[in-house]
Image (cartoon, rainbow, N blue to C red):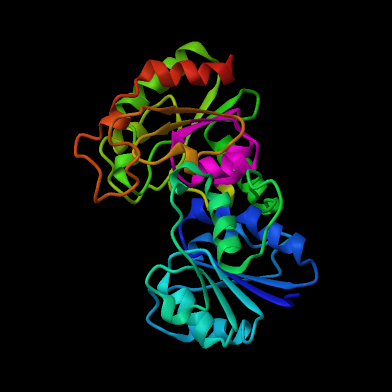
């Protein structure tokens, strides 16, 4: 019996959403435990308010102050077990300094601070990532989690967020009387991005065929190739940089369809049961794509998936070979 359980995943937005079924399974297996989850400040709003997490702690390793680390250590002091399902070195250090007797997870160059480790499993590219997390926990501790790990979770949006999205959409002339198609074209790794000019052509085809509103979401602080031209299209509502993560989730929840690449937004769609057309290039859809209500477009080129920028080819053939017609045809199956 574990009274205090500490779980860490300080990876990206998508990775944290993919952790939610594991957190629920842990709470289901140990319902009387106090479950503390550590992630980064960028993911806080995606886990705060989830009923199966008792406490969320945030660690920012880029902060000039170390007070956050010491505050976390005080909160998790002498927990019964630490499940470290990220690759982060400092997650293991924090658990070690907190005097947690069982510190389990992937070895990954941090064995000095771990008591129970699991090797990087062969074939993980062919296994949906939440099941990889469950394997890490089982292989390092013997704890066998149960549940539907394809079911993802995000918190319920607050009335303030719901009202904000309603007003924001209305300011763009979107009143809810037409289906909404959300486009999420850009990711942090440029090799996962489908060419912008093809998104523009796709949007024109959709608008010519369906009476719908098209919304563009994403980060407006990076100068993506062709990003300015895409954002300035008169036929779309550009909401890039105007929303929080939960507000983006609310927009996706109201949408009839999400179209995008392998990024956090596709997991938001999965968590809100929103259909999605997902364009895959160098990453493995077997590992990263939602399991339900999706159409996956992926080319089995000789080097794909490479899933790592050091290996990626400069031609990016895997995603470049996916045509506008293919994406439009897949989208039509949800829009018709």
> Compared with residue 144, is residue 194 higher up or lower down, i.e. above or below?
above
Q: Residue furthest right?
A: 32
Give whichever of 124, 95 is nearer the camera: 124
Q: Quadrant of the C terminus?
A: top right
Q: Is residue 167 visible?
A: no
Give whichever of 173, 240 is nearer the camera: 240
Place of residue 233 in the rendered image (x, y in percent of width and height, measured from the top left):
37, 28
As for residue 144 lying within the magenta part, the answer is no
Q: Residue furthest top?
A: 209
Q: Residue at x 34, y 24 (%)?
A: 322
Place of residue 272 in the rendered image (x, y in percent of width and height, measured from the top left):
65, 41
297 relative to 177 in the view: left or right: left
> Compared with residue 177, is residue 40 higher up or lower down, i.e. above or below?
below
Q: Quadrant of the N terminus?
A: bottom right
Q: Residue at x 46, y 81 (%)?
A: 113
Q: Which residues are magenta?
A: 248-277
Place of residue 169 in the rendered image (x, y in percent of width and height, measured from the top left):
57, 37
Give whichever of 123, 246 is nearer the camera: 123
As for residue 270 lying within the magenta part, the answer is yes
Q: Is residue 154 visible?
A: yes
> Compared with residue 87, is residue 247 higher up or lower down, i.e. above or below?
above
Q: Residue at x 61, y 30 (%)?
A: 293
């Amino acid at each position: 019996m574990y009274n205090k359980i500490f779980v860490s995943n300080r990876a990206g937005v998508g990775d944290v959403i993919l952790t939610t079924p594991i957190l629920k399974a842990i709470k289901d297996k140990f319902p009387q435990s106090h479950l503390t989850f550590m992630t980064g400040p960028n993911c806080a709003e995606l886990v705060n308010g989830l009923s199966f997490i008792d406490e969320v702690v945030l660690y920012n390793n880029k902060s000039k102050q170390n007070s956050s680390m010491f505050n976390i250590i005080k909160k998790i002091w002498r927990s019964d077990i630490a499940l470290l399902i990220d690759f982060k070195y400092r997650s293991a250090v924090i658990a070690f300094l907190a005097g947690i007797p069982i510190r389990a997870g992937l070895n990954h160059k941090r064995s000095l601070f771990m008591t129970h480790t699991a090797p990087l499993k062969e074939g993980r590219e062919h296994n949906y990532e939440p099941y990889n997390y469950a394997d890490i926990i089982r292989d390092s501790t013997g704890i066998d989690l149960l549940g539907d790990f394809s079911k993802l979770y995000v918190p319920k949006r607050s009335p303030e967020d719901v009202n904000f999205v309603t007003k924001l959409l209305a300011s763009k002339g979107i009143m809810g009387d037409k289906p909404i198609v959300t486009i999420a074209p850009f990711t942090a790794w440029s090799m996962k991005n489908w060419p912008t000019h093809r998104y523009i052509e796709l949007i024109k085809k959709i608008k010519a065929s369906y009476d719908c509103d098209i919304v563009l979401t994403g980060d407006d602080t990076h100068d993506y190739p062709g990003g300015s031209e895409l954002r300035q299209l008169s036929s779309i509502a550009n909401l890039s940089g105007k929303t929080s993560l939960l507000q983006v989730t609310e927009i996706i929840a109201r949408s009839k369809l999400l179209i995008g690449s392998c990024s956090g937004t596709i997991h938001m769609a999965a968590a809100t049961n929103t259909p999605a057309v997902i364009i895959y290039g160098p990453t493995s859809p077997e590992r990263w794509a939602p399991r339900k209500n999706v159409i996956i477009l992926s080319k089995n080129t000789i080097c794909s998936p490479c899933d790592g920028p050091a290996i990626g080819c400069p031609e990016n053939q895997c995603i470049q070979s996916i045509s506008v017609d293919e994406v439009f045809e897949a989208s039509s199956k949800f829009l018709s």
